[in-house]
Image (spheres, rainbow, N blue to C red):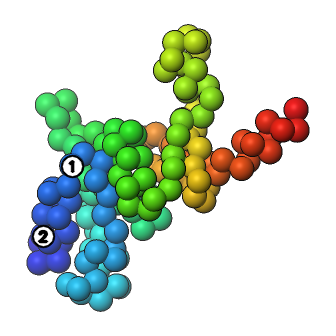
């Protein structure tokens, strides 16, 4: 394993669950192309997860095997890194508060940032810009 790969993995292991890595953090060690190539290799080997564009996280080892980090911990890391606000959508909040027993099939979160999809293992978490929801609620 290369020195760059070891540096990336040690940085990832030092983060709490759901801690996110960005290629920009390693540009002092190598060129952007070398960092991107190393991150791609680590993802293919299963040592890192590509959560989104330019965002990587460490999969967690448990006694039951490897699992992706918890959605809430990834969201908290994204909020602190970018300063955007991310909250659960109405259906998920209603279920969390016990107002309904229906569990949403899709995991949709509202964000003050751009709309995008996070990939946490086999789960896809949709981040939708809150203005879409506000416009849809106002038209009905």
Residue 67 in the image: state x and y as whole percent: 28, 39
**Residue farthest to the bottom?**
31
**Residue farthest to the right?**
139
Image position of 105 (left or right of 52): right
Asked if 64 appears above or below 78 in the picture, the reply is above
Residue 89 in the image: state x and y as whole percent: 60, 34
Question: Is residue 64 shown to the viewer in this render?
Answer: yes
Q: To which quarter of the image does residue 100 belong?
A: top right
Disc 2 to disc 1: CB gap under 8 Å: no
Q: Which mark is residue 16?
A: 1
Asked if 106 appears above or below 134 in the picture, the reply is above
Question: Is residue 40 shown to the viewer in this render?
Answer: no
Residue ID at (21%, 49%) = 16
Give the CA separation, mark 2 to mark 1.
18 Å
Residue ID at (50%, 56%) = 84
Question: Which of the pair 37/23 is nearer the observer?
Answer: 23
Q: To which quarter of the image does residue 56 belong?
A: bottom left
- Quadrant for the N terminus, please: bottom left
The mark lying in front, picked from 2 and 1, is 1
- Quadrant for the C terminus, please: top right
Asked if 66 appears above or below 31 in the picture, the reply is above
Residue ID at (61%, 25%) = 91
Residue 129 in the image: state x and y as whole percent: 64, 51
Counting residues from the start of the chain, the first of labels 2 and 1 encountered is: 2
The residue carrying pointer 2 sits among few (fewer than 14), some (14 to 19) or many (20 or more) residues within 10 Å by Cα, namely few
Q: Which mark is residue 6?
A: 2
Residue ID at (34%, 43%) = 73
């Amino acid at each position: 394993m290369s020195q760059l790969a070891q540096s990336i993995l040690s940085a990832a292991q030092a983060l709490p669950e759901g801690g996110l890595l960005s290629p920009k953090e390693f540009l002092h060690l190598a060129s952007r192309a070398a960092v991107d190539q190393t991150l791609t290799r680590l993802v293919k080997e299963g040592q890192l997860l590509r959560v989104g564009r330019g965002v990587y996280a460490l999969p967690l080892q448990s006694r039951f095997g490897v699992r992706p980090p918890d959605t809430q911990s990834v969201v908290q890391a994204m909020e602190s890194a970018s300063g955007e606000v991310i909250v659960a959508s109405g259906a998920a909040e209603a279920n969390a508060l016990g107002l309904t027993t229906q569990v949403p099939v899709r995991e949709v979160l509202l964000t003050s940032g751009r709309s995008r999809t996070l990939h946490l293992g086999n789960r896809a978490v949709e981040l939708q810009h809150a203005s879409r929801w506000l416009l849809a609620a106002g038209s009905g």
